[in-house]
């Protein structure tokens, strides 16, 4: 995520919440930071 | 016991290494051995602090049991109770006199101070315990033995000054049977990091520190140049002191085949305040993000840019207070909170880019000024120094350019060499992790 200059913690939270809604799977806030790449997000929601 | 003491380097550390790697032959439990040595390490400073950490460990373990073996609604109640217990413990021993002082000032009362001892490392083990309970509640951590939890909290390398570690990061390493066997490569790399940390602490931080101490007791005598010298020296001192101590912790742990997370990544090379907090005390930033920023923001009705900035300021207020019971630390936190807000606004709404040098220059000076609040004991002193640093009169009255303090700096060759080396190392050199990265097994 850090490769995108405009990326920040707010974007990170927003995308996580949106994915949780779409996939109906909860991500704990304490784990959210670990999902810091497309690959990790993909693996988590798969 | 401190990492740079003779007793640690030449007695404690060699002894624990010998016992740890021979625990299999001596038929001693290696975790128990680490716990006993860690208790000795902690008590060596002051044995009266020991009951506090034992109280923290036993109570948090009790909450772990309650959170794990209860239904969801009750689990949440115990999590909240656990967090309240940890915060109360911290407030009781670290902030109570500060609170009493402010109540007395505000309401003209005269409540007496409690003057309780300030247990070493309480800020670190409290945060680590809170993180642990949240992880237990989230079911990231399951099936924890009392001995494992005790070791997780009291493990001596990370106990005093961090890094703040997660249970799931540490425990697999203690459980791995390979890690009980002496590893020559880890030992040598660990020794290298320990020595780098020792040099940072003993030579750089202490040399700069003696000059900084002298300056901060004579603030009214300082002028433009000496204020800049003083603030720069303190910025380097703080970096070398803290990162040196963490290096010694990392090195000591690695000699025992335990990897600690990186806590500093050349923070003084940062090109923005956002970048700075991703490089300075990284594990604290991660803790604040995961356990305060995200939950708070998530709990708000509207998650938007404005709310996230309010939460950012609040989080950095907490970060400031966490550093110490003083209004100076509150201001330090707020200073960085507002810095981050400005940085985010710039990033979101402005498309032009500063040059890398200008970005670094602005960031470094912002951080340098913020550290003045970190070192002074009174807000007035900090303001006095900052005023002198930006005093426009200096350009018109060159006769007062050098004062006693700046002259003592330029007359001290050792200090000049130390200062110039600090500049070189902080701005141009790779950090100890980058240098050893290819050989390290950092995760």
Image: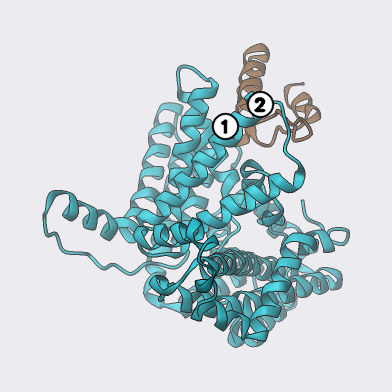
Chain colours: A brown, B cyan
Q: Are marks 1 and 2 on the same chain?
A: no
The x, y position of residue B428, in whole percent, is: 79, 61
Residue found 60% across the figure and 22% down from its top: A26
Q: CA distance from mark 1 to mark 2?
A: 30 Å
- Residue occupied by mark 1: A29
Position of B51 with respect to B144 (left or right) is left
* Protein chain holding label 2: B
Q: Quadrant of residue B206?
A: bottom right
- Residue B138 in view of the camera: no
User: Quick check: marks 1 and 2 in contact, CB under 8 Å?
Assistant: no
Please, is residue B230 above or below residue B287 in the view?
A: below
* Protein chain holding label 1: A
The x, y position of residue B302, in whole percent, is: 48, 17
Q: Nearer the viewer, residue A4 or B63?
A: A4
- Residue occupied by mark 2: B350
Q: Nearer the viewer, residue B264 or B161?
A: B264
Count the labels in the image: 2
The x, y position of residue B107, in whole percent, is: 13, 49
Residue found 42% across the figure and 50% down from its top: B331
Q: Secondary structure at mark 1?
A: helix
Please, is residue B46 above or below residue A21 in the view?
A: below
Residue found 58% across the figure and 29% down from its top: B345
- Residue situated furthest left in the rendering: B109
Discs 1/2, front: 2
């Amino acid at each position: 995520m850090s490769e995108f200059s405009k990326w920040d913690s707010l974007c990170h939270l927003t995308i996580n919440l949106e994915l949780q809604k779409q996939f109906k799977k909860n991500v704990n806030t304490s784990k959210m930071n670990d999902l810091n790449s497309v690959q990790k997000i993909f693996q988590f929601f798969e | 016991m401190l990492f740079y003491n003779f007793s640690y380097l030449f007695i404690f550390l060699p002894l624990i290494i010998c016992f740890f790697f021979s625990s299999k032959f001596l038929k001693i439990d290696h975790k128990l051995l680490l716990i006993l040595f860690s208790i000795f390490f902690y008590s060596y400073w002051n044995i009266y602090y020991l009951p506090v950490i034992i109280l923290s460990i036993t109570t948090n373990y009790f909450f772990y049991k309650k959170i794990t073996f209860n239904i969801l609604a009750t689990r949440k109640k115990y999590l909240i109770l656990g967090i309240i217990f940890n915060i109360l413990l911290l407030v009781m021993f670290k902030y109570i006199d500060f609170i009493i002082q402010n109540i007395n000032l505000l309401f003209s009362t005269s409540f007496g101070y409690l003057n309780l001892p300030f247990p070493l490392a309480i800020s670190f083990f409290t945060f680590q315990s809170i993180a642990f309970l949240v992880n237990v509640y989230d079911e990231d951590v399951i099936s924890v033995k009392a001995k494992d939890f005790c070791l997780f909290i009291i493990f001596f390398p990370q106990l005093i000054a961090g890094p703040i570690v997660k249970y799931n990061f540490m425990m697999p390493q203690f459980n791995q049977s390979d890690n009980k066997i002496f590893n020559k490569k880890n030992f040598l790399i660990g020794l290298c990091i320990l020595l780098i940390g020792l040099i940072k602490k003993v030579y750089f931080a202490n040399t700069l520190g003696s000059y900084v101490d002298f300056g901060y007791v004579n603030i009214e005598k300082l002028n433009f140049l000496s204020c800049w010298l003083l603030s720069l020296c303190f910025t380097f001192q703080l970096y070398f002191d803290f990162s040196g101590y963490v290096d010694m912790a990392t090195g000591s742990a690695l000699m025992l085949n335990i990897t600690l997370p990186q806590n500093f990544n050349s923070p003084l090379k940062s090109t923005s305040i956002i970048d700075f907090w991703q490089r300075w005390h990284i594990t604290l930033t991660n803790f604040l993000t995961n356990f305060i920023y995200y939950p708070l923001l998530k709990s708000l009705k509207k998650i938007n840019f404005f709310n996230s900035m309010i939460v950012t300021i609040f989080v950095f207020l907490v970060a400031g207070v966490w550093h110490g019971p003083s209004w100076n630390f509150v201001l330090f936190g707020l200073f960085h909170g507002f810095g981050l807000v400005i940085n985010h606004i710039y990033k979101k709404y402005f498309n032009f880019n500063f040059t890398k040098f200008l970005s670094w220059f602005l960031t470094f000076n912002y951080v340098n000024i913020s550290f003045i609040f970190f070192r002074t004991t009174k807000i007035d002193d900090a303001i006095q120094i900052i005023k002198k640093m930006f005093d426009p009169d200096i350009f018109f009255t060159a006769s007062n350019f050098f004062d006693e303090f700046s002259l003592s700096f330029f007359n001290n060759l050792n200090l000049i060499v130390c200062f110039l080396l600090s500049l070189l190392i902080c701005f141009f050199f790779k950090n100890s992790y980058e240098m050893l990265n290819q050989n390290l097994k950092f995760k």
